[in-house]
Every structure is written in C-alpha cells, then in structure tokens.
Image (spheres, grey):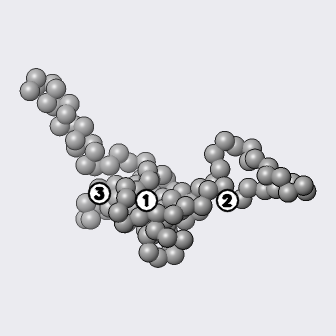
Amino acid sequence: MPAGGAVIGHGIEHNKNNQRVEPLTRSPDVYGWLSWDRPAASLTTRCISLSNGRFGHPEQHRAISAREAACLQTFPKTYRFFGSLESRARQIGNAVPPKMAQAIGHSILRQASGS
C-alpha cells in the first residue's frame, strides 16, 4: 500500500447470500500508513500499533516507533518517557502536543495582558 493509503472496513463480513453485514459498532476498523507530505492523523494511546489506526510508517512495513510518535507530537528528541512500551505509547497518545500547549499558553497570556 502506498504512503498515505488506508484500508477501511477491515474484517467486514458477508452473510451466506454474499450480502455485506455491517459491523455492530458505527466505526469500522481502519488502518493505514502515514504520508511524508500530509499531516498525520491524530495519535492515540495505541499509536505504535499498525492495526489500531493510521500509524504505519510511510516507507517501511511497520508501525511508527514510540520515538517517531513523540516527534509527531512535537516532543523534543531529548525528552524521556518512562515505563513499559505500552505505557510510553499511552503517555504520547494522551499528551497535548508541547508546541500546541505553548501556543495556547501564549494566547492566554496575551489575552490576560490585554495586548
């Protein structure tokens, strides 16, 4: 699959008459690959899993690493996460991106100071 591609509806079943059977949930499984030249999808706590979102590496047949996910979230390359791999992915996926938090903070300060 090319970078930025996606497979939607993975796991959809068909009945004995070969008619499509809709999943019980409203959101079908979606997985795909990031693209070098397009914004990344929102990261989740399972952002290092190929089967839990559009978190495939744009060129390699693998999910993005925790460090790659952290870079997408704008964490500095020197920022250290602690815990198991699952715990680190959860910290990254649940985080407000640092550069976004900084922009929001600056906006609040500008509004508070009246400038």
Identified at 22% across, 41% down, the residue is 103
Identified at 51% across, 59% down, the residue is 54
| Residue marked by disc 1 | 88
Q: Indicate the quadrant where residue 75 lies.
A: bottom left
Q: How far apart are marks 3 and 1 (CA)?
A: 13 Å
- Residue 105 visible somewhere in the drawing: yes
- Direction from residue 56 to residue 13 in the image, left or right: right
Q: Residues within 10 Å of mark 1 (few under 14, many from 20)?
A: many
Q: Position of residue 100 (x, y in %)?
A: 28, 45
- Direction from residue 56 to residue 101 in the image, left or right: left
Rendered image: mark on residue 10:
2
| Residue marked by disc 3 | 75
The mark closer to the camera, 1 or 2, is 2
Looking at the picture, which amino acid does disc 1 mark?
Answer: Arg
Total labels drawn: 3
Q: Earlier in the sequence, mark 1 or mark 2?
A: 2
Identified at 79% across, 52% down, the residue is 20
The mark closer to the camera, 3 or 2, is 2
Foreground pick, 60 / 96: 60
Q: How crowded is mark 2: few (under 14 residues within 10 Å), some or many (20 or more)?
A: few
Secondary structure under tag 2 reads loop
Looking at the picture, which amino acid does disc 2 mark?
Answer: His
- Direction from residue 62 to residue 7 in the image, left or right: right
The mark closer to the camera, 3 or 1, is 3
